[in-house]
Amino acid sequence: MEIIDPVTGKRKAITGTPEQLAALKHLADLVETGKNQEVPAAVDAALKTGMPPYDVLINGLQAGLAVVGERFKRQAAFIPEVLISARAMKAGVDVLKPLLVKANNKPTGVCVLGTVQGDLHDIGQNLVGIMLESAGFVVHNCGVNVRPEAFLAKVKEVNADLVGMSALLATTMMNHKTTIQYFADNGYRDKVRFMSGGAPVSPEFAQEIGADGYASNALAAIELAKKLTQSGWNGNFINGDEVGAHMAA
């Protein structure tokens, strides 16, 4: 059976018994169509075929979302459709989490998210959080109107690798810079990597204020987060939108 690889965005063949492949296809279809109430039972059914939890995650749940993600990149799907599928996948991830921990699957990274101080919008950053969790990140969402000191306190508490900042208003987007500067003033800037996004934010703005990367949407944020947490990252600014476009080509 062929799926869209959630990591590379390219098609790949997966193998298994007929029962296992049927369970994975059913699970991927449920995620693709956003049927979150049916996903947990489908995850259980896939596990009963003897598949490891990680395979159910990658080849079932994430493969279903990857179909919608590919459509989104072609502008054949929109944010509400991605959100519906992401929520369906999260319902399955919640079932798998205890099993993945038991299997000692190391998380991809630890990310602290929040909408910057003065801004109360959270739809976009909530979607980013769901998507990052599904990609194997541990996510700590601080919510909205997050002060720089609250970001830093949470980063220290959970030993985060990443900080994801969002803003919907042009009047609050400068608090991205304020947050990064607060980390620098407290000797913590070099211990974490910053992702910047939100409607008024541009790649040029994100780079100018000292962020490590930019993403305009949740799918690009996943690719950006993966790049920033790789051991081979060279410290250069990354435009997550360009990474996603390259992988989709």
Image (spheres, grey):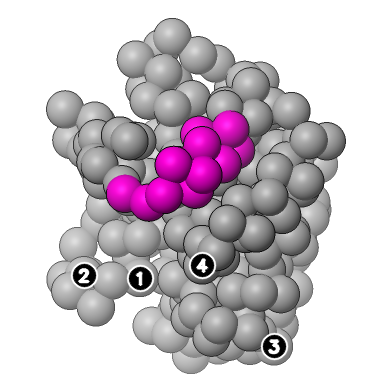
Q: Which residue is mark 1?
A: 229
Mark earlier in primary sequence (3, 1): 3
Q: Quadrant of residue 210 in the image?
A: bottom left
Mark 4 or 3, closer to the camera: 4
Q: Which residue is mark 3?
A: 157
Range shown magenta: 15-28
Mark earlier in primary sequence (3, 2): 3
Q: Amino acid at mark 3?
A: Glu
Q: Which residue is mark 4?
A: 52
Query: Which of the numbered marks, if any, corresponds to residue 233?
Result: 2
- Quarter of the image where the N terminus is located: top left
Residue 220 in the image: above or below residue 184 = above
Residue at horizontal 48 percent and vertical 25 percent from the top = 68
Q: Secondary structure at mark 3?
A: helix
Mark 4 or 2, closer to the camera: 4
Mark earlier in primary sequence (1, 4): 4
Query: How many angstroms separate mark 4 from mark 3 (CA)?
Result: 32 Å
